[in-house]
Image (spheres, grey):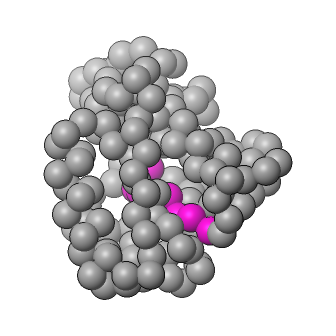
Amino acid sequence: MQHPLKGCAVYAGSFDPITFGHLNLINRAARLFNNVVIGVGENPKKNYLFDLEKRVAMVEAQLGGLENVRVQPFHGLLISFAEEVGAQVIVRGLRASTDFDYEFQMGLVNMDLRSEIETLFLLSSPEHIFISSSTVKEIAYFGGELSRYVPEDVAAALKEAFPHPGT
């Protein structure tokens, strides 16, 4: 497969859980770059539904056929992780203007910290623009249908995490 952009890119998030929106961005980044590292982050300020090991496993389970993509957990600053794995680019997804405001600020901070690592914004595909991990967890909590938002095995993990709707 020809990749129009050489080098390594990082696409990072908490992936708590991974959604079809995340997978769309992963697949698009894999078409653009020779090597893509999916960084599954651990932030002590966040409360996660799934532990880091489970989140990494859920992401890895979705990568069938993407030989140029690997998953790696990380702690600390994303820009430091990008440098550690030899990435020249950080890929970030944008769903709405609120994402842009936050991502723009983070991109500027990362540029200040490591000017040699670029940030590339990819727009969410229209069919995934409203999907977020938080929304998916809320739907799961109340026993809603998940098949439009997450892969089947992720939906099963969510149903196991929330066995009784609304409790």
21 displayed left or right of 103 = right
Furthest-right residue in this view: 1
The C terminus appears in which quarter of the rendering? Answer: top left
The relative height of residue 4 versus residue 73 in the rendered view (above or below) is above
Horizontal side, residue 143 vs residue 11: left or right: left
Q: Position of residue 43 (x, y in %)?
A: 32, 68
- Asked whether residue 97 appears in the rendered view, the answer is yes
Residue at (59% x, 78% y) in the render: 85
Numbered disc total: 0
Q: Residue at the location (35% across, 18% down)?
A: 143
Image vertical order of residue 66 relative to residue 141, above or below: below
Main secondary structure along the magenta-highlighted residues: strand
Residue in front for this viewpoint, 17 or 130: 130
Residue 157 seen in the figure: no
Q: Residue at x 24, y 24 (%)?
A: 166
User: Which stretch did the figure color magenta?
Assistant: 8-16
- Residue 105: x and y in percent read 19, 63
Which of the two residues, 86 or 164, is positioned nearer the viewer here?
A: 86
**What residue appears at the point 27 percent right and 82 percent down from the top-left corner?**
112
Residue 99, image x, y percentages: 24, 46
